[in-house]
Image (cartoon, rainbow, N blue to C red):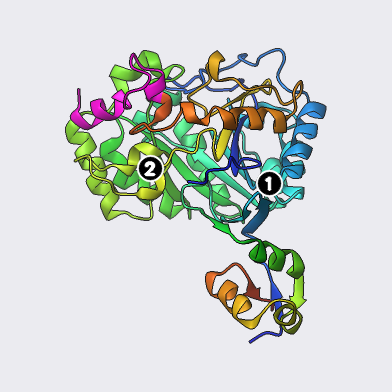
Amino acid sequence: MRSEPLSAPVTITWEVTLGCNLHCDHCLSGSGPGHQRPNELTTAEATAFVDELDEMDVFQVNIGGGEPFVRPDMLELLAELTARDISTCVSTNGTQLGETTLDRLEAMDPLFLQVSLDGLRAENDAIRGEGVYEAVVDSLSRLAERDIGTTVNTVVTRQNVADLPEIYELADAHGAGLRLNRFRPSGRGEDTWDQFRLEEPQIRFLHGWLEEHPDVRTGDSFFYLNALGEVRNNTLKQCGAGSMTCLVDPVGDVYPCAFTQWDDLASGNVVEDGFQAAWDDIASLRNRVDDHEGCPAVAMGSADPSGEDPQLRAILSGD
Amino acid sequence: MSGTLSKPSYIKFRRESNGGLVYDHENYGYEDASMYAVSETVVDVLEYVGDRRPRAEVESEFSRSVVESLLERGVLTDAE
């Protein structure tokens, strides 16, 4: 770990809207139809923010939401990012990818897409809505014909974990990689935590399966431990929230990560304060999100903010 | 062996207070990217190469061993 704070984040997550055409039961940001905040960044404000990202030499921007493509100016903003050679990763629900959109995305570089699929047809549609599986598979088929780096992202739940081998094959058949993410009690996930979280035998299955599939990418620090609590991936142990990465929400407020959007960890606004000032401030907060096992964000939100990630223990023990 | 060096498009770099950072990224997400702290010399070389630069010029400005090291690490590549 460097002793000096970085001059800028390596990557950021930018939640560009809370609007979404879907209303998923586990949505980490609680997004949905009509959920746009009235003061989400305008095109001009968002473009000025992209300029500052470029000036600060931020290497990579992960676009999320909400569903990014419900923003009418999304393609314009992606073009602004990629024109500056900022690696741009877009997380989408996969239902808004018409041919005209794909034509424009294919012309952008460096740009990568992540399409959400939370199970096979029944399990996915139970969480994400009727007909969504069909729409996503159709999009994957069309993406397979395109020169667009594509990954399928699955939030692993009690209902879909047994289907991972088939989801892996489905992604592979469409030329896409598979990336797994941890289900967290964030957004609507707070209400559905007991419904979707893994049970202990499933956790053991998951980690055994991951050992056999090293090409499957895993999206957060939970996966640095295996089901026995042993370190399996040191590169993921170090949480980068506030030190290498941060989150910018739809109105431009800056937080350490997507799961620490709490008032006492807000560090400024990209419009009112500028992103550099917000980053400098959040980097100084880093000592408040360090020295935790598991996910510091979850630990800090627990009853014992200085303790370990209680979910990690709960997940490992199945409690 | 090509007589021209270039930086692969998936390699990004910048200066920091003590040296610099190199970021190697080819896929969605950051978990399978590589990032490492580098010396100011590495940043100097990457800035000098720019889009592309004859290898002989780079070796003359810095050293043959530095160029070979960066080629070995994939930070520079032989331009086609």
Q: Which residue is mark 2?
A: A237
Residue closer to the observer: B26 or A22: B26
Host chain of mark 2 = A
Residue type highlighted by circle 2: Lys
Q: Is residue A202 left or right of residue A27?
A: left
Question: Where A62 sits versus B63, above or below?
Answer: above
Examine the rendered structure and indicate whether residue A63 appears above or below residue A30.
below
> Residue at point 46% right, 47% down?
B31
Seen in the image, is B70 located left or right of residue A168? right
Question: At x 71% / y 81%, what residue is drawn?
Answer: B55
The residue stretch that appears in magenta:
A298-319
Looking at the rendered structure, the secondary structure element under dot 1 is helix
| Label annotation for residue A105 | 1
Q: Residue at x 21, y 41 (%)?
A: A205
**How far is the residue under mark 2 from the one under mark 1?**
33 Å
For residue A262, which numbered disc appears in the image? Answer: none
Q: Nearer the viewer, residue B31 or A183?
A: B31
Count all numbered tags in the image, as a single digit: 2
Pointer 1 chain = A
